[in-house]
Image: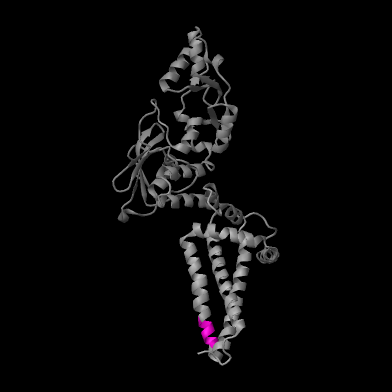
């Protein structure tokens, strides 16, 4: 029942103002949630699709501090003013009990209908909400009074958090990109191969030449006093188009012999000549060089093979453009490669891998962690744990895993079997037979 004062003409105006303020606070609450949840990558993808409202959306999400403070200020103003006016009308209409009625109305209507409902809808429909609200928010941000108030608020916020200036927003980190790729794969937005390719690209920048090179024991080389015909036969037998040529030992590489040059020399009757006179310049790179810069250098200087040296100048291996590309797209097997699977899955969750496999790759396959140290490969980890070159079938245990030397070639571990230890057999890490 209304109070004795009855209905006034001004009450209608107050009701209209309350409705406008509440609707405005609801729209702004929706805009706040949707814009904050929209990443720059998503906004640019929408712009590439020419979605309506995507262009102002891109401008907003690139600098979120420019819209967040104005929205928060306007939402606060709308809610405080509407709540005050509701209290005034409730007291006029219902007397002293109107305070209670007004409070209940504010909690139920303002919070539920104009705060919780818009934000929940924005959470479940982020694209539609962001595209709808972006033009409106962009217009509000450009409005002079709002713009001035925004600058004041940003300056105050920067002073409180100790930030100077109005610099760009924080960049997306590599871990965030990897997480985005994993989420996209889990939601079937991208294929498994696409996810693996994204991971390869991200990891590519952190990989060094030592991790992808052909190690010294696997290098196919030729002495400088060997004949052109002998060098050509060795290149054809190995299936390589380029061979490093050394003087006294592999630490003294004098150049690179190209199979094409050797064929031409052979056909012109120069087969008996020493190969040292038919070599091209050799390129040397440190083992710690990043593969990304190595690939760019190969492209710019137009060479496909480089000799890898350590800090003392000794040859530790060689790297080819194929080795670098394989880091991105996976193993490239041609008719000269031995068709041996890089990974063999065993019953019970174990795997058999090449000793050259990087420890990080093996850990990812196992879904666990492997020790890190002065080694890069699984074979290097085995040698460090064993403390010597093992015999075939010998094993070591580390972090609840058993590593077994499946095949040993000379002083190198060629294949390693990795399997989880039975729970009862778990214990401190160490070597065993």
- What residue is shown at x 48% (from left), y 49% (from top)? 178
- From this view, report whether residue 36 is shown above or below residue 285: below
Q: How many marks?
A: 0
Q: How is the image coloured?
A: one colour
- Main SS, magenta residues: helix
- From this view, report whether residue 124 is shown above or below residue 291: below
Between 9 and 245, the one lying in front of the other is: 9
Query: Which residue sits furthest left?
Result: 347
- What residue is shown at x 41% (from left), y 52% (from top)? 187
Between 317 and 62, the one lying in front of the other is: 62
Q: Using residue 389 as the reference point, say whether residue 154 is left or right of it.
A: right
Where is residue 143? Give x, y as percent. Answer: 67, 62
Residue 313 in view, yes or no: no
Query: Which residue sits furthest top?
Result: 269
Magenta extent? 98-104
Between 283 and 203, the one lying in front of the other is: 203
Residue 99 shown in magenta: yes
Where is residue 330? Give x, y as percent. Answer: 43, 37
């Amino acid at each position: 029942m209304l109070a004795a004062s009855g209905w006034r003409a001004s009450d209608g105006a107050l009701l209209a103002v309350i409705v406008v303020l509440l609707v405005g606070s609801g729209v702004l609450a929706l805009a706040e949630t949707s814009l904050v949840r929209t990443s720059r990558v998503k906004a640019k993808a929408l712009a590439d699709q020419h979605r309506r409202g995507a262009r102002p959306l891109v401008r907003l999400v690139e600098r979120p501090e420019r819209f967040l403070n104005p929205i928060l200020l306007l939402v606060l103003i709308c809610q405080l003013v509407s709540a005050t006016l509701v209290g005034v009308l409730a007291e006029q209409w219902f007397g002293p009990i109107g305070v209670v009625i007004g409070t209940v109305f504010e909690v139920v209507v303002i919070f539920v209908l104009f705060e919780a409902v818009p934000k929940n809808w924005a959470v479940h429909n982020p694209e539609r909400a962001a595209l709808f609200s972006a033009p409106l928010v962009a217009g509000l941000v450009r409005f002079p009074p709002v713009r001035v108030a925004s600058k004041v608020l940003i300056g105050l916020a920067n002073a409180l958090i100790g930030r100077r200036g109005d610099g760009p927003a924080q960049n997306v980190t590599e871990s965030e990109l990897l997480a985005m790729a994993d989420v996209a794969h889990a939601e079937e937005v991208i294929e498994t191969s696409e996810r693996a390719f994204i991971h390869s690209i991200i990891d590519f920048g952190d990989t060094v030449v030592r991790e992808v090179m052909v190690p010294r024991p696997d290098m196919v080389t030729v002495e400088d006093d060997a004949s052109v015909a002998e060098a050509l036969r060795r290149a054809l037998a190995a299936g390589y188009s380029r061979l490093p040529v050394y003087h006294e030992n592999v630490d003294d590489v004098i150049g690179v012999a190209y199979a094409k040059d050797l064929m031409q020399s052979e056909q012109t009757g120069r087969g008996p000549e020493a190969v040292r006179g038919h070599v091209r310049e050799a390129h040397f790179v440190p083992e710690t060089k990043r593969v990304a810069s190595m690939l760019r250098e190969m492209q710019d200087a137009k060479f496909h093979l480089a000799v890898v040296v350590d800090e003392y100048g000794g040859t530790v291996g060689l790297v080819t453009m194929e080795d670098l590309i394989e880091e991105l797209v996976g193993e490239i097997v041609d008719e000269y490669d031995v068709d041996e699977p890089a990974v063999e899955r065993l019953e019970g969750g174990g795997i058999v891998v090449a000793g050259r496999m990087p420890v990080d790759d093996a850990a990812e396959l196992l879904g666990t962690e492997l020790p890190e140290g002065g080694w890069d490969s699984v074979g290097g980890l085995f040698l460090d744990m064993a403390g010597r070159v093992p015999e075939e079938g010998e094993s070591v245990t580390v972090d609840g895993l058993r590593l077994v030397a499946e095949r040993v070639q000379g002083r190198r571990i060629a294949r390693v079997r990795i399997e989880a230890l039975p729970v009862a057999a778990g214990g401190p890490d160490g070597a065993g037979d």
